[in-house]
Image (spheres, coloured by chain):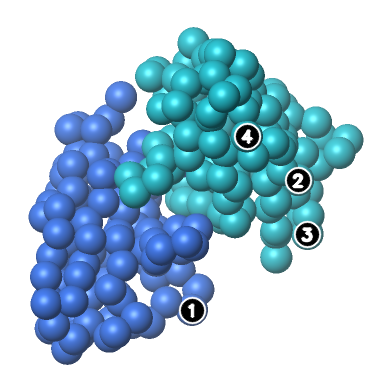
Amino acid sequence: EIVLTQSPGTLSLSPGERATLSCRASQSVSSSYLAWYQQKPGQAPRLLIYGASSRATGIPDRFSGSGSGTDFTLTISRLEPEDFAVYYCQQYGKTFGQGTKVEIK
Amino acid sequence: QVHLQESGPGLVKPSETLSLTCTVSGGSISNYYWSWIRQPPGKGLEWIGYIYYSGSTNYNPSLKSRATISVDTSKNQFSLKLSSVTAADTAVYYCARVDPNSGSYDWGQGTLVTVSS
């Protein structure tokens, strides 16, 4: 089974700053099958990015995804107050990374 | 737009079997994979397994011996049974539809299941 490792565990940033989140796979993952989700307390996760770099419907363009093979990145260009949450990567319908919490500094 | 709703007991006794059903509305259960995921309080997401509408399944190896996922196409539902539960199985359980092209999820709202005597 593919293991996804996210780093850092926690990212402390201020609104307006840039956030860079990493997801590393234990073996190569097809870019078509790498997704990113945002989760806020008490809510189900929300799809942000699919196919490694395609934004889901209604997702602002400050969110972008990139990467291939074993290394993938989620970038939030300028943090808005509503972006402080936990972010997960996932490979095709199966395993998740352990999450990165983006908190207000 | 598809809507998924989990249902089942919110409290299960240790050593018993947890049973949940996901009802799909706004779309057919056919031609998709359907997944169960859980999240213990304060922890991350754990994939339990998924089922194709035809009945083929794939499970997380760590839960394979205790989890059974089934589908009822006539009711547009799929279900999860998790046997021999312990307090470690206390979690919010989510059902989800798997996009066939990307593998990404459309999520239900989740339901909290507590294992306690």
Q: Residues within 10 Å of mark 1 (few under 14, many from 20)?
A: few
Say which amino acid is labelled 3.
Answer: Gly
Which chain, by letter, is cyan?
A: B
**Label 1 and label 3 in one chain:** no
Say which amino acid is labelled 4.
Answer: Leu
The residue lying at 19 percent from left, 32 percent from top is: A27
Q: Nearer the viewer, mark 2 or mark 4?
A: 4
What residue does disc 2 label? B23
Q: CA gap, disc 3 to disc 2?
A: 10 Å
**Label 2 and label 1 in one chain:** no
The residue lying at 27 percent from left, 85 percent from top is: A80
Q: CA gap, disc 1 to disc 3?
A: 20 Å
- Examine the rendered structure and indicate whether residue A43 appears above or below residue B82: below
The answer to which of A67 and A6 lies nearer the viewer is A6
Which chain, by letter, is blue?
A: A
Give the side of residue A62 with respect to residue A22, left or right. Answer: right
What residue does disc 4 label? B11
The percent position of residue A98, horizontal first and vertical second, equals: 26, 44
The residue lying at 29 percent from left, 84 percent from top is: A81
Q: Residue furthest front?
A: B117
* Displayed quadrant of residue B94: top right
Q: Earlier in the sequence, mark 3 or mark 4?
A: 4
Q: Label 4's element?
A: strand
